[in-house]
Image: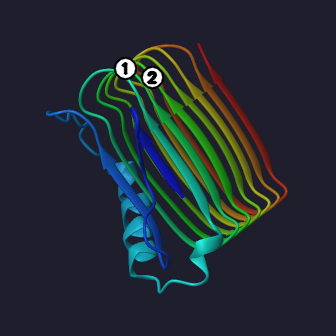
Amino acid sequence: MMIERENETMQPHTGLHAASVEGGASLARSPIRTGLLATAAAFALLLATPAMAADLAASEISLAGNLGHSATVLQDGRFNQAALAQREMSQFAQIGQSGSNNQLQAIQSGQANLLQAVQVGSDNLAWITQSGSFNTINLNQHGATNTANVTQSGAGNMAFIEQFGNGNRADVTQLSTASNAVVRQYGNHSIARVIQY
C-alpha cells in the first residue's frame, strides 16, 4: 500500500491493511444520515475482523487541493484494491474491503462530499465519482461479482446502494440538487439503473 500526500510517501505495516489520512487543519464533515448507519456498522465489523494475508492488498490515496480531506481504507483478505483521489475541499471517505479481488475506484472533487463503502466477498467492483457539494454515497456490496457505478454532481444528493448476492449491477447517476436514490438488490443477477436530472 502506498499513501501519497503532496510529496510524502509512507509504507504501513503488514497485517490488517489499513490507511488513514487527514489533510489540512479543519475537517468539515457532513452529518451522517440515517441510511448510512448500515455502512458504519459493516465498517465497524470489518475493523474487528482478524487479518488474513492482507499484505497482498493494495490501496492508493491521493490528497490534493485545500483543507480538510479525510480518508480511511481498511483491507482484509487477498488482492483487494482501492484507489481514492480527493481534490478541492473537505472530502471524507471510509472504504472497507474484506475477501478477495474486490476493486474500488473513487474520485471526489468539489466540497464536503461523503463516501462510505464496504465490499465483502469476492470480485466486487465499484466506480465512484463525486463532484459538486455535500453529496453522499453509501455503498454495501456483499457477495461476488457485484458491480456499482455511481456518479454525483450538483449539491445535496444522496445515493444508498445495497447489493447482497451475486452478479448484481447498479448504475446511479445524479446530476441535480437534493435528489435521493435507494437501490436494494437481494439475490442474484439483478440490474438497476437510476438517472436523476
**At label 2, which amino acid type do we have?**
Ser
Is residue 77 at least partly visible in the picture? no
Q: Quadrant of the C terminus?
A: top right
Q: CA distance from mark 1 to mark 2?
A: 6 Å
Tag 1 residue: 88
Residue at x-position 46% and y-position 83%: 49
User: Are discs 1 and 2 less than 8 Å apart at CB?
Assistant: yes
Q: Position of residue 127 (x, y in %)?
A: 66, 39
Q: Residue at x 61, y 82 (%)?
A: 53
First of labels 1, 2 by sequence position: 1
Q: Which residue is mark 2?
A: 109
Return the x and y of residue 68 as percentages of the image width and height: 24, 32
Q: Amino acid at mark 1?
A: Glu
- In x, y percent, where is residue 57? 62, 66
Q: Where is 15 relative to 165, above or below? A: below
Q: What element does badge 1 sit on?
A: loop
From the viewer's side, name the closer residue of 32 and 108.
108
Front-lying residue, 52 or 130: 52
The disc placed on residue 151 is none
